[in-house]
């Protein structure tokens, strides 16, 4: 198994096509959550959006660097004595910028994971019946996710000492993403974190009554999220297949797998909030007879909205009682009402509830 064989122009087009698809989902998610929802937003809801935006910005930075690298390679394509697709006098600078781009990969991936976790906390906080166990499980997954993020930052920063070995073309070139030991640690931590996040909705689903269409929606979202796991495994397999060969022989595979992983992660985290948009429904509050995962997942503010609507109706009824021509304690006496009149003073007012 070798590197992906595509023209450099095709790699640039692929990166920006994936970014364009991601942009559509991110923009629609933010618009749906900020413009179409009434009432105050929870801290978890705001945090989820911030994570998604940070993930998206990091993805733009990563693609921008990839575009710069491939444009530079196009400029020098066909010239002799190229290293990583550029002349030797430019290769060290290219490798240094590539090392910086690795940070944007993991920042984007882990911010997407954080957006997913914050979204689940949004559900937990809106429904007390989900129980303390769900919140504890979410907190544990959050801590593990943060620790794996710190692990990746440390691997990139300290795997090669001094750090300049990451772009030392005259000595022993070192890279955390080309070392099988480092990549193995990274892959297991990444995939393990994704599996924990995918398992977290099970705590929600088993406590909710949902329709068949909602079940398929959740399965589709989890399927998209699992693609990022496949991309991580493909990247690991590609490095394993070319282990011992020159590091430049698999550089495109690493970049493409990383971008696919970022894209699928953002699509997965944006999908729950867009179900109402794609179904063409407006977020109109109603009074559900039972807890429905479709209502909660597409509009987690629904529970508080219904409660406020009910309180408003109760206060309206109380205000009408004060308009009664008789005192309330007088109306409570059955002896003061005509037995066969056919109507009563209580039912003569317009019904408000």
Image: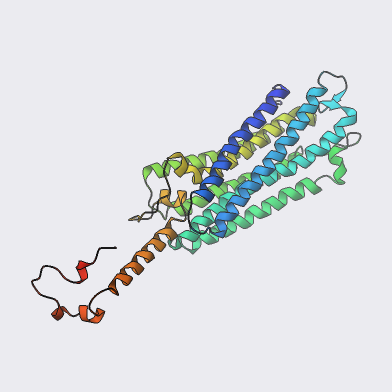
Q: Residue at 71% of width from left, 52% of height from top?
A: 150
> Which image quarter: residue 248?
top right
Q: Is residue 128 left or right of residue 225?
A: left
Q: Residue furthest top?
A: 78
Q: Quadrant of the C terminus?
A: bottom left
Residue 189 at what x, y percent from top left? 66, 47
* Residue 244 appears in the picture as rendered: no
**Screen quadrant of the N terminus:** top right
In-front residue for pair 195/315: 315
Residue at 54% across, 45% down: 31
- On the picture, is 333 further left or further right than 6? left
Camera-nearest residue between 7 and 34: 34
**Residue 197 drawn at (x, y percent):** 56, 49
Q: Is residue 312 above or below residue 325?
A: above
Residue 75 can be seen in this image:
yes
- Closest to the observer: 154 or 216? 216
Q: Is residue 266 left or right of residue 213?
A: right
Residue occupying the point 81% across, 20% down: 77
- Depicted 326 relative to depicted 147: above or below: below
- Residue drawn at (47%, 42%) of the image: 277
Specify how the rendered protein is coloured. rainbow
The extreme left residue here reads 340
Total number of numbered labels?
A: 0
- Of residues 241 and 288, the one nearer the viewer is 288
Instruction: Reply above or below: 66 against 45.
Output: above
**Horizontal and vertical percent position of residue 152:** 72, 48
The answer to whether 183 is drawn above or below residue 84 in the figure is below
Residue 217's spot in the image, x, y percent? 45, 42
């Amino acid at each position: 198994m070798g590197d992906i064989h595509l023209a450099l122009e095709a790699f640039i087009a692929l990166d920006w096509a994936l970014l364009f698809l991601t942009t559509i989902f991110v923009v629609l998610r933010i618009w749906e959550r900020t413009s179409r929802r009434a009432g105050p937003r929870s801290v978890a809801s705001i945090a989820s959006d911030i994570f998604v935006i940070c993930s998206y910005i990091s993805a733009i930075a990563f693609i921008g660097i990839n575009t710069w690298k491939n444009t530079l390679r196009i400029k020098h394509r066909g010239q002799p004595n190229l290293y990583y697709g550029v002349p030797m006098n430019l290769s060290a600078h290219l490798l240094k910028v590539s090392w910086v781009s690795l940070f944007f990969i993991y920042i984007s991936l882990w911010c997407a994971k954080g957006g997913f976790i914050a979204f689940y906390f949004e559900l937990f906080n809106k429904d007390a019946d989900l129980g303390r166990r769900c919140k504890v499980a979410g907190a544990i997954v959050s801590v593990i996710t943060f620790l794996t993020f710190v692990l990746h930052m440390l691997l990139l920063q300290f795997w090669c000492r001094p750090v300049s070995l990451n772009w030392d073309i005259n000595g022993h070139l070192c890279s955390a993403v080309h070392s099988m030991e480092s990549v193995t640690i990274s892959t297991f931590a990444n995939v393990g974190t994704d599996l924990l996040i995918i398992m977290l909705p099970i705590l929600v689903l088993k406590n909710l009554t949902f329709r068949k269409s909602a079940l398929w929606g959740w399965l589709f979202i989890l399927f998209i999220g699992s693609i990022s796991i496949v991309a991580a495994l493909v990247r690991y397999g590609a490095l394993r297949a070319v282990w011992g060969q020159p590091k430049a022989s698999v550089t495109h595979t690493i970049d493409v797998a990383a971008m696919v992983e970022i894209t699928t992660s953002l699509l997965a985290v944006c999908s729950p909030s867009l179900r109402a948009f794609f179904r063409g429904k407006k977020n109109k509050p109603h009074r559900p007879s039972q807890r429905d995962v479709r209502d909660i997942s597409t509009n987690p503010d629904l529970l508080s909205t219904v409660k406020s609507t009910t309180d408003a109706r109760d206060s309206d009824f109380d205000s009408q009682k004060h308009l009664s021509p008789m005192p309330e304690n007088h109306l409570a006496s059955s002896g003061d009402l005509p037995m066969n009149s056919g109507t009563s003073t209580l039912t003569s007012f317009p019904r408000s509830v």
